[in-house]
Image (cartoon, rainbow, N blue to C red):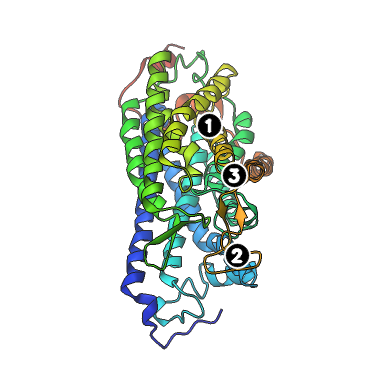
Amino acid sequence: MSVETTAVYAEQVSLNSLVQNILYASGTVGAILVVVGLLMIDAGTARRKNLFNSTIEKTMGFFLGFATYFVIGFGLWAGQYYIMVDATMMDSIKDWWLGGALTNATAQHTDPAVFPGLNTFQIFIFFLATFAGIINILLHFAVSERMKASAYYILCIVMAVVSSGLSWATWGSVGPLTNAGFHDFFGVGFVYLFPAGVAMVLTPKLGARPGMMEPHPRVSAYLAPSIGLAAPGLLLIFAGLPMVILSCLFFFDPEALAVSVTMADTSVGIAINNYALVWAGGAITGMLLSYKSGNYAYTLLGPLAGYVAGASGFDVYLPWQAFLLGLVAPLVAFAVYEFTLKRGIDEHKLFPLFLGCGTFGMIIVGLLHAGTPRGGYFGIEEGPYAFQHGEISLFMQLIGAVVCVGVGAVTGMVMGFVLERTTGLRVSEDDQIEGLDKILWEIEPDVHTPADSSVQRA
């Protein structure tokens, strides 16, 4: 698209457009709060001897994904709207890569006939780039303390590109799967199921951490430094996500008419309250499970389980449905968690929350709200992209979940094969026992735990 650089187009910088800009910018703030919350959870649960390294790897992985998205990712996601108007994916990439015409244009000098609402789309690059980074942080929870940094960083770049292509297909309103009936309000597929699919392949390759699943001759127990730090991290995520939810809505005339990113009928109040209630329901059941089992993990998994299960349908659930879903979801997480625990699988976050609750939530959307109109684009009245021409279906929910996990698994298989034969994939057991803070950074923990003492006696 050619961009005009001389005239001033007031409608591109009106007060109404500024309000929307601020709203979407708040979504980036919310996403960054999620990043901080995730890092706090990690800081509270990683082994003391790996604490700095684990945090810094997640941080660097975040920025690698973030920067990669600015380079190429947004052009892939936005391609669905170009194809809708008979342009091509390559046209989108040319406009929206880091050096693209629209990425570098000023809104007031861009004719709305060329691209209306330019500021909003430019802010959306930042917003979605943050989630490209979050995907990498989430994967790191599954490979932390045992995957080589070089392998992880290479994987972060690849995952940012692949997840961007997956978002084109599964998140928006006119991507191929979305337009055909797959419904995913929050991006559960490409943000949560995709890295879980990668972890399905890489976790067995990496094996369990010494002392995590059972006592080790040189590590008597895997001890977290400050589990209590995870609870404030959890609440920080809770505080940030409402702003993200607002950024998953489109707003049309009249000025505050909201439809979901899938073009389903919804409202700001319904979406926000559904979000609140899945957390509350999950927290209640998680509390009961934790006191019944004596396992503190369910106090953290409970509210997150409710949230992940509900995220794909925040726009279409009724509040009472969201609350009931939040109450049930931790039971799914419990079943998956116990299944992995009994089989010695060292992955207790992505599998119960994403594979378990994420897939469960998508199925529930298909069961409760099959036939709900969505898809297409507002203002288009006929053709394959007509507003709300498609309907939610259980079949498409299953197809979408399988595609997202499958793309992750294929990514994990390909990259695992390549990395094992190049940089290497796994940190040696001796280095894991010694602690990566000392091995890589010459940092010694200031407190020695009973588990550390067992190493000294060995």
Which amino acid type corresponds to the residue marked 2 in the rendered image? Answer: Ala
Q: Quadrant of the N terminus?
A: bottom right
Give the x, y percent position of residue 444: 36, 29
Q: CA separation, marks 3 and 2? A: 19 Å
Q: Amino acid at mark 1?
A: Arg
User: Which label was assigned to residue 101?
Assistant: none
**Residue at 53% across / 44% down in the picture?**
188
Q: Residue 318 versus residue 279: which sits nearer the camera?
A: 318
Answer with the quarter of the image where residue 40 lies.
top left
Residue 36 vs residue 416: left or right?
left
User: Can residue 52 be seen by looking at this rendering?
Assistant: no
Q: Which residue is mark 2?
A: 386
Secondary structure under the numbered disc 1 in the rendered image: loop
Amino acid type of the residue tagged 3 in the rendering: Ala
State the residue position of label 1: 146
Q: Is residue 395 left or right of residue 242?
A: right
> From what the image shows, is residue 355 above or below residue 123?
above
Judge left or right: residue 207 versus residue 109: right
Counting from the top left corner in percent of width and height, residue 98 is at 51, 67
Please tell me whether mark 2 or mark 1 is closer to you in this view: 2
Q: Position of residue 301 (x, y in %)?
A: 43, 29
Image point 46% across, 25% down: which residue? 434
Q: Quick one: label 1, few (<14), some, or many (20+) residues within 10 Å?
A: many
**Cβ atoms at labels 2 and 1 below 8 Å apart:** no
Circle 2 residues within 10 Å: few <14, some 14–19, many ≥20: some
Residue 358 seen:
yes
Q: Which mark, by number, is residue 370? A: 3
Q: Nearer the viewer, mark 3 or mark 1?
A: 3
Question: Which mark is first along the chain, 1 or 3?
Answer: 1
